[in-house]
Image: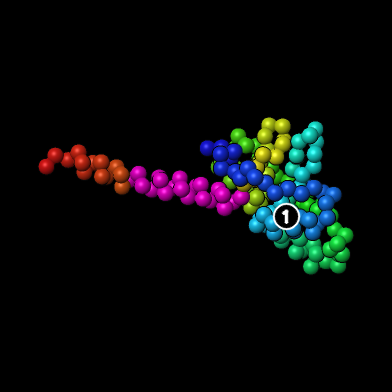
Amino acid sequence: MTIGRVCTREVVVAYTHEPLHEAARLMREHHTGTVVVVEVAGGARVPVGIVTDRDIAVAVFATDCDAQKLLVGDVTREALLTVREDADILDVVQQMRDHGVRRVPVVDTRGTLVGIVSSDDLLEVLSEQLSGLAGIGARAMAREEQRIVR
């Protein structure tokens, strides 16, 4: 199964030059703890970072920075991991584990943002698959019971 089948296609985005408080407002408005930071390249939104509610709390409250002067780009994490929408789910799980991230922007073949996937999204899909696998034995035994001539 590909990541494009399970990712969330409606992504809340912010731009590097926007005030950080705008990212916080977007999070509140959309009931999310993450915004994908994008830049426009060739008319397409290309992810360049992620900002979480935790990033904002650390940037504002754990430093002496003036919150009103911070821009989204000031707290954007570098070395962003992205995955292509045709990537296999298990490969994405491995990459997220290797990079220690819980959310990953999903891009198309041109690098354009098409979605986001979280560890919670993957856990839900994989648990459904495992649950189905666990039920195979019970169904096989029931089928065998039906075949027994009495």
Q: Residue 46's x, y, as percent?
A: 75, 39
Crowd rating for badge 1 (residues with CA inside 10 Å; few <14, some 14–19, many 20+): some
Residue 60 position (above or below residue 144) = below
**Residue shown at the point (88%, 60%) measured from the top left:** 69
Could one spot residue 85 in this view of the protein? Answer: yes
The magenta region covers 118-137
Quadrant (top left, top right, bottom left, bottom right) of the C terminus: top left
Our reading of the magenta stretch's main secondary structure is helix
What is the image's colouring?
A: rainbow
**40 relative to 128, above or below:** above
Q: Residue at x 21, y 43 (%)?
A: 145
Residue 52 % position (x, y):
71, 56
Which picture quadrant has residue 106? top right
**Side (left or right) of 92 relative to 24:** left
Q: What amino acid type should be assigned to the residue bearing mark 1?
A: Leu
Number of numbered callouts drawn: 1
Let me know if residue 98 appears in the view.
no
Q: Hey, which quadrant is residue 85 in on the image?
A: top right
Query: Magenta segment: does it hold 113?
Result: no
Residue tagged by mark 1?
26
Residue located 78% across and 52% down the image: 76
